[in-house]
Image (cartoon, rainbow, N blue to C red):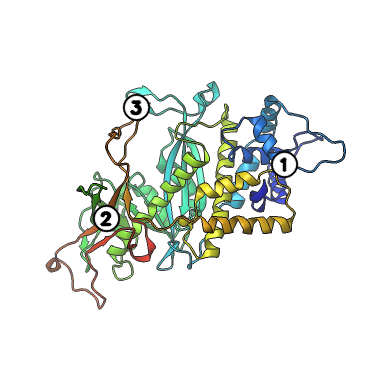
Amino acid sequence: MGLLSRTFTPELVDFVVDEAGAREERTRSLPSRLVVYFVLTMWLFTGNGYGLVLRELVEHWPRRRGEEWRPVGTGSLTLARQRVGPGPLRLLFDRVAGASGSPATPGAFWRGLRLASLDGSLLDVPDSEANAAAYTRASNGGRPGPYPQVRLLALVECGTKAMIGAVFDSFAVGERTLARRLLVHLHTGMLVMADRGFPAFGLWQAAADRGAQLLWRVSDSFTLPVDHVLSDGTYLSHLNGPRGARITVRVIEYTVLTTTLDKDGASGETSELFCLITTLLDPASAPARELAELYTARWTSETIFKHIKIEQRGGRTATLRSNSPAMVEQELWAMLCVYQALHQLAADSAHRAHLPVSHISFKQTLAAARRSVGADFSPRQLTAKVRDVQDDLIREAVKPRPGRAAPRATKRSGTGYRSLRPDEPATTHVTHTIELQLFPQDQRPAPPNSPAIPQITTYDETSPPPRQMASAA
């Protein structure tokens, strides 16, 4: 696989094939190792059919004198995929997934805690009879959606965009149910952020019992009584569980005021109220202002899903290839493996140049991996080629840009977003102001001997917020 062979070595691929019991019993023209590489390569050439993907993979392989490649039919490749199954790809993802940041990595740690984000997304699968029976559809204006859908949930590392773990199931399976399958990846020394779809007594308790610290946004439907006002103006509350059980949480409320300025000089303001709950109960060791700024890092997972669904998959309207649930599973594990390998290449490039990983273009990384597919590199040649590509990625690094905002708009029917007007700018300059909603000073207990906590923070991307956190959009 060219550059990606540094991640998917033949030894590793053979290991997962044997571990999954997918080794062929007799000599075949499509051995299991080649099929695994073929399924991975499908995610580098999503617009190509099976035959063209295989040609990209094997066309430049060395051949003995008089040896020729015989074209393989689509049916043969489909049967080979079915023979191998999803097991090797799932094991391969387990081997390559994981956090990769260090305390020196920008945005990866905060006060000694590794930052992680939990979020989900949906993927369309072909509307075959088998897929329709296994995966449900979202409703669209009271009617079933055009395609069955898979719900994907991922735990990702902020700062590096590495996938720590991922699970998926039918659209009918909720995010909270899937989240329980990812709790095995939580441990002491992590701070896990999540949006409004996740907070619930049982899931919160189970996640906290793993030893990780939590910072989750809650919806308006949550009742959070004031149990105790803290010295910084935030307060302690509790979540109610079964049979009178309670869990104490700290509540941080703030407003994000967004000021936009378009190219014609017109400005506007919008505001949004945020309410966060956290296991970090001590204001001295976890200042409210820092946690409010920190929560913007949760958008790391949104960025990853954009990379996968738009750039790697080939667009918002693209579906997967597979017509059976087992092959859908195989294809999704391959998708996650290829993303992780591309991330590793980008992260290593950023580390060499002492840059945030977000400054390395995912599109450029994907393009470099595509160009190298089929090349037969020796270990020394592979090392040299990787270094050359990293040099190119560093030269093409995305430079810091002014804060921008793009309105949620679409030209596709059937969504809840309005259409973008022809004369409306796609993006505008934006500044975000965080204003904490705190209890008045006379309602707080006597503060400890610690510096005062500022209540208002204003920033844009031309003057980054503290600790290199990205602004919320």
Work out whether residue 99 can be spotted.
Answer: no
Residue 172, position in %: x, y? 43, 32
Q: Are marks 3 and 1 in contact (CB under 8 Å)?
A: no
Q: CA distance from mark 1 to mark 2?
A: 50 Å
Nearer the observer, disc 1 or disc 2?
2
Residue 231 to residue 169: above or below: below
Secondary structure beneath label 2: strand
Three-letter amino acid code at disc 2?
A: His
Residue ID for mark 3: 414
Left or right: 281 as drawn, with respect to 300: left
Marks 3 and 1, the one that precedes in the sequence = 1
Three-letter amino acid code at disc 1?
A: Arg
Nearer the observer, disc 3 or disc 1?
3
Residue ID for mark 1: 33
Q: CA distance from mark 3 to mark 1?
A: 43 Å
Question: Exactly how many numbered labels are in the figure?
Answer: 3
Instruction: Please rate how many residues cluster around mark 2, counting C-alpha atoms within 10 Å: few if below 14, some from 14 to 19, many from 20.
Output: many
